[in-house]
Image: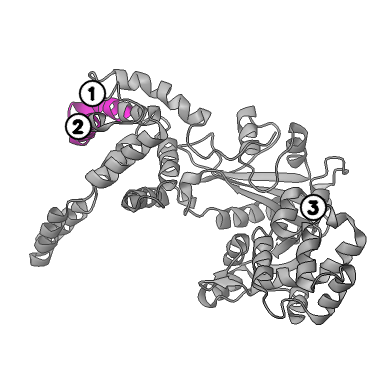
Amino acid sequence: MNQALPSSFFDRTVLNLRNAWRDIAARGRSSSIAQTRPDLPDDDIQRLRKHIVECLENRGGEVSARARAAELGRCFLALSPDGRKRFLQVLAREFSTDRDRIDAAIRSYQAAEEPAAAVDAEIALRDALVSPRLRLLMQLTALPDGFKFLVDLRAELLSHLASDRSLIALDKDLQTLFTSWFDVGLLDLQRITWDAPASLLEKLIAYEAVHEIRSWGDLKNRLDSDRRCYAFFHPRIPNEPLIFVEVALVAGMSGNIQRLLDETAPREDPQSADSAIFYSISNTQRGLRGISFGNFLIKQVADDLSRDLPGLKTFATLSPIPGFRKWLERKLAEGEPNLLTAAERSTLKLLDPSRGAKGGLKALLARPGWQEAPEIAEALEPALCRLAARYLVREKDAGKPLDPVARFHLANGARVERINWLADTSPKGLRQSAGLMVNYLYKLSEIEDNHEAFSAHGKVAISNSVKGLLGRS
């Protein structure tokens, strides 16, 4: 039932734009780009360039301007991947700011002596710093679903940045716009229930990025009375969740995702729950990469739940550790001295005397079904829990935790509360983290202090149980 997160903007919503914009485009005069070929060969680029200039000149009034913008958008949607890349390159390389105009505006600003002249010069400088392509992008927002179109256009752009650095400035233009347009103050927090439109429920299934939604029954269970799902929406993209979080209302801190998602488990009374467990957070729009919503989402949901269910005392996550297995395998391959303690080495050698302890650890983790063999699981637990604590707390890149999920929650003011053994025995959980998961605790009275200590000094807040694991290192 689960679908891969859409990697390009050719989902049903965006494909419908071509039809939605057809009537608008038809109100203008015949377009020179109406018959543009999918790969955008050189002679079609000439027509595209001419059409963009016409858009920027803004002749003929609002109706004509909207028609030209709609035809430009329809042209982009009809292109092949190579054609779309060439389209983006034209925007990035040929419709940037005018350096001579900027230099002249700077000189005028520096030369202005009277207050009124200085104000005029400042306005002229600001105008000079706005690229023509930015003005063009703004025109597209006036179209129906224009915001969605630009978000997905950036998703397409991001896939080309590594191979073509000339696109960076265009990406920065889009990111600047999005930072303003998608400010959290402009977003709507909504609870999603089983009564939501089927089209929205389908999107939850498609966009779920942490724990696959296997069926409609699985989804219904996640939206039951002892569960919650919240999402941020933007008024200009009302049918698209930007990010959503799934929450379980339970007694005590959950430490196993399979039990948490068990459809056959009895329903709990949310009024008697003392813990809200955030077990999945999914960003849905790749084009909004770099625009942060998650920290605000968690805090707003915690506030909402506190008002509705005053019995809740604990707000925590049950989170994956997606980079742990990869990091561990790299350390084993490097042969790091003292990676394992003496006691751990002795235990592993008893299980497989023919190998060294590190080779035995690697071989055991590669053995299918190892998690179901009690003697293997018991032998691996102390070493893997200790190493997971080290990975989450001490392993850094540029002063930040290696693990992306840890970076997110620690920056939001959470603390590393508990390492959970065999908490996710799905194929994905075993592949990513040898079945381990972690609880990050959001203690509302400590969030701000933890955030400041992490942001200013890189200090990671940890519980006594995690300190105990690290003490064995």
Which residue bears the numbered disc 2?
50
Residue at left offset 28%, top offset 42%:
91
Mark 3 residue element: loop
| Residue holding disc 1 | 32
Q: Which residues are magenta?
A: 47-70
Residue 470 position, x and y percent, is 73, 78
**Left or right: where does residue 294 sit relative to residue 159?**
right
Is 326 in front, or is 66?
326
Q: Circle 3: is it few (<14), some (14-19), or many (20+) Cα within 10 Å?
A: many
Task: Find out whether the residues at labels 2 and 3 contact each other: C-beta distance under 8 Å.
Answer: no
Q: Residue 410, located in which quarter of the rendered image?
A: bottom right
For badge 1, the amino acid type reads Ser
Total marks shown come to 3
Are discs 3 and 1 less than 8 Å apart at CB?
Answer: no
Give the vertical position of 16 relative to 339 (above or below): above
The residue located at (77%, 80%) in the rendering is 472
The residue nearer to you, when weighing 208 against 41, is 41
Q: Main secondary structure of the magenta part?
A: helix
Depth order, front residue of 106/12: 12
**Amino acid on which disc 3 is placed:** Thr
